Image (cartoon, rainbow, N blue to C red):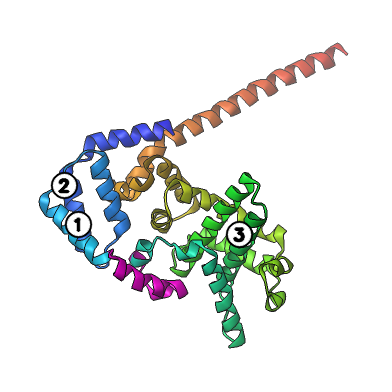
Amino acid sequence: MDQIRREITYISNKDLSAATINDMLIEELVQEPRNWVIIDSLELIASNAALTLEPETTAALEAAKEQDQSLLALGRECASCMWSADNCELSIAMACGLAVNLTPIADITGLTRAGIAHSQGNEIDQVDVLLSIIGLSVTAISLVAARSPATIKSGATIKAGAGFLKFAHTTGQLPPAISRILVNAAREGIHWHRLKNVRSIDDLEQVKNMRALEPAVEAISDIGTLLSDTNPTQALYLISQSDNVTELQRTTKVSQILGTETAGYFRIFGKSRILRTTFKFTDGVLGVLLGLAGLMSSIILGYLQRKTTRWAIRQ
């Protein structure tokens, strides 16, 4: 982590400037729809680095915030997102903060939606149902185990991860590797024929095959941890920018240092440069360590072989 932090500091000191921030903010503010994850991240970078924004940039920022982020505008858009994320722009959903999907309301809505689809003979979104069941289950566990801080923390982490993935799924932002885990869990981990008998949260136990659900729950918990290091809107953006699991893991490590500045750094320097620069040393060290491990193993095995041979000769 210290090496990654040093590399990022070096890049910033070398190439980060007020002019760059101002130019990129103006470019982002004229986009439609605006990506407030990037805009807010760029503004935060400027503030933390004590880089002065031009008066024109500041005025444009204030006008855009008034237009996109007023309480009335957000109230209308979030109401639409509550029932289905397909009804809203991704940028608006980010502005809503994914609040709905981090509460039991979204899980209940997901199961209700599945029930309606089943009664009408329509296809059920199995991943959405899976995440709803997991979300409601950990909510119930956390409530029952209210005296155990560890259980509450674990349940909250999984609930946050499930809510995030629910929204990422419905907006098409799930990385293929995570999508495969969830699809397999939905196929093997839920007794679908029993779902029609569910009348309460307690009834969910009869529809779950926990052994088959374990890989999904583990992945959901990991992503919940990512959320705690950043925030839902930043995580949604970052996961959508990750082309594979390795890249997602590296982005997560960078985010542990940069927090919600990560999106801005990707915008300024490019995702590839940030990940390549910050991990070239780490990967090199790993290669050296693996090489040394192989060398030491060879030396030790050779020594043991010689000792064995000498013992055999003496016998």
Separation of residues labelled 2 and 1 (CA atoms): 10 Å
The residue segment tinted magenta is 69-91
Image coordinates of residue 133 in percent, x first then y, are 62, 66
> What amino acid type should be assigned to the residue bearing mark 3?
Thr
Mark 1 or mark 3, earlier in chain:
1
Mark 2 or mark 3, earlier in chain:
2
| Pointer 3 residue | 139
Residue lying at 45% horizontally and 46% vertically, measured from the top left: 229
| Pointer 2 residue | 53
Residue lying at 73% horizontally and 20% vertically, measured from the top left: 304
Image coordinates of residue 106 in percent, x first then y, are 52, 68
> What amino acid type should be assigned to the residue bearing mark 2?
Leu
Q: Residue furthest bottom?
A: 120
Image coordinates of residue 230 in percent, x first then y, are 42, 48
| Pointer 1 residue | 61
Tell whether label 1 touches label 2 (CB within 8 Å). Answer: yes
Left or right, 163 with respect to 138, comes to left
Q: Residue furthest top?
A: 314
Residues 86 and 215: in front is: 86
